[in-house]
Every structure is written in C-alpha cells, then in structure tokens.
Amino acid sequence: MSRFSSARFMLSAASPAQFPADRGVEIAFAGRSNAGKSSAINAVLARRGLARSGKTPGQTRFVNYFEVGPEQRVVDLPGYGYARVPERERVHWASLIEGLRERASLRGLFLIVDARRGVGAADQDLIAWADPDRRAVHVLLSKADKLTRSEATAALKAAQRELEARATAQLFSAVSDLGLREAQQVFLDWLGR
Ligand code: GDP
C-alpha cells in the first residue's frame, strides 16, 4: 500500500493570500507544461489520478495543494513555458510563485524536465527563483523511457553540467518506473520521514 494512501487534495489557491498556514513542510513540483509533472506527482505518491494534468493555458492560474501527512504538503505549481501567454497571466504567475518562495515551510522543489528536451532557460529561471542556497532542488529528467540507455546517460550528464551545484538530477519515468525509488527517497528525506 502507498505510504501516501491518505493523500488528499486540499485547495486551489489563486493568490498567496489563499495559501494554507505556513507550518510544517511543503514540497513543490514544477515544470514546463506537458513535461510530465502531474504524472510524476502521482508516481512519487503512488496515487494514480491525484494530480490532474493541465493542458490548457488558462490553467496557469492556480497553485494546487495536497496534504500528504500532518502538516506535510505537496504544492503543484502551474506549468510554465507557453510561448503566447498574455502579459496579465505572466504577472499573475509571478505573484503566485513570489508568494510561495517566501514560505518557511517550503523545503524543496522537484523540477520536472523532459529528458529529451533538457534543462532550458525557463527551468533555470525557476531554479534561481527557488533560491537553491536556501532549499534543495532536485530535477527529474522525465519520460526517460523514450530514450535509449546511451541517450539517457548523455541526457543526465548534460543536465548535471547545466545545473552545476544548484540542483541534483536523475533520470525518471512515470511509465516504466525508472528512477521511481530514487525520487521517492528524496521526497521522503525532505519530509523527514
Ligand atoms: P504535465 O502537463 O507536466 O502535468 O504533464 P502530464 O503528466 O500530464 O504528462 C504530459 C504527457 O506526457 C501525457 O500524455 C503523459 O501521458 C505523458 N507522460 C508523462 N510522463 C511520462 C513518462 O514518464 N513517459 C512517457 N512515455 N510519457 C509520459
């Protein structure tokens, strides 16, 4: 049985004022739209269907909170990287993540990056935002099942080069469960379990 069988959706916040009380520990998941973030949350928590994928630009408005234990939360950040998001929406997104970064309970960030695409400028911006001196960032190079073994090794090396000491990285697949245990271990360590 999943260690997170009691994980449940808490709330959707459209502004930092709606975030839950800043107590305990929370772990954020972020990534470009379609990078595989929802699949990664569901795989790490072993809870199919908990996080829903947001495929349309309109869904960049909300931060979704899940409770995974007493005063333990997962924060699902809206996907980024839409080329033609209106300015108003970009400003709104920035205010959401600015509010999040101030939170003492935010322990770490899982950044989902499509392994075939590699770490891009928008991903680097998000890492800078998370303040890697203050909290941990772990990159899941997702959809690694779509790569050959040698391509996957090359992708991991390239990502590690790009990230330098700002973040750790690993290969991951929500389909083949490649790297799942490693990702779950990081998650549990951050929760202090
Ligand atoms: P999100 O928009 O970042 O939340 O991405 P989703 O989790 O909804 O995934 C986007 C698409 O990629 C969906 O069609 C998923 O089925 C697919 N996908 C996600 N993770 C994997 C993976 O590990 N391997 C493969 N082959 N496809 C994946």
Image: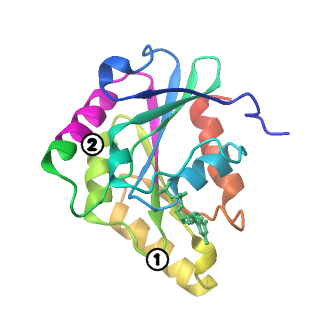
The x and y percentages for residue 78 are: 39, 45
> Which numbered marker is on residue 129?
2
Residue 150 vertical position relative to residue 57 in the rendered view, above or below: below
Quadrant observed for ligand 1 in the rendered image: bottom right
Considering depth in this image, is 182 or 113 the residue closer to the camera?
113
User: Does the segment drawn in magenta span residue 181?
Assistant: no
Residue at the spot of label 1: 116
The x and y percentages for residue 193 are: 68, 29
User: What amino acid does circle 1 point to?
Assistant: Arg
Q: Going by the image, does 89 lie left or right of 139? A: left
Residue 77 vertical position relative to residue 31 in the rendered view, above or below: above
Name the residue rendered at 35%, 52% in the picture: 166
The x and y percentages for residue 10 are: 55, 24
Residue 129 vertical position relative to residue 9 in the rendered view, above or below: below
Name the residue rendered at 29%, 33% in the picture: 96
**In whole angstroms, how far apart are the C-alphas of marks 1 and 2?**
24 Å
Q: Which color mode does the image show?
A: rainbow
Which region of the structure is painted magenta?
Answer: 91-111
Q: How many marks?
A: 2
Considering depth in this image, is 177 or 61 the residue closer to the camera?
61
Name the residue rendered at 44%, 41% in the picture: 136
Q: Going by the image, does 97 lie left or right of 23? A: left
Q: Tell me, yes or no, whether the two marked residues, 1 and 2, touch with CB atoms within 8 Å.
A: no
Near mark 1 (Cα within 10 A), the count class, few <14, some 14-19 or many ≥20, is: some
> Which numbered marker is on residue 25?
none
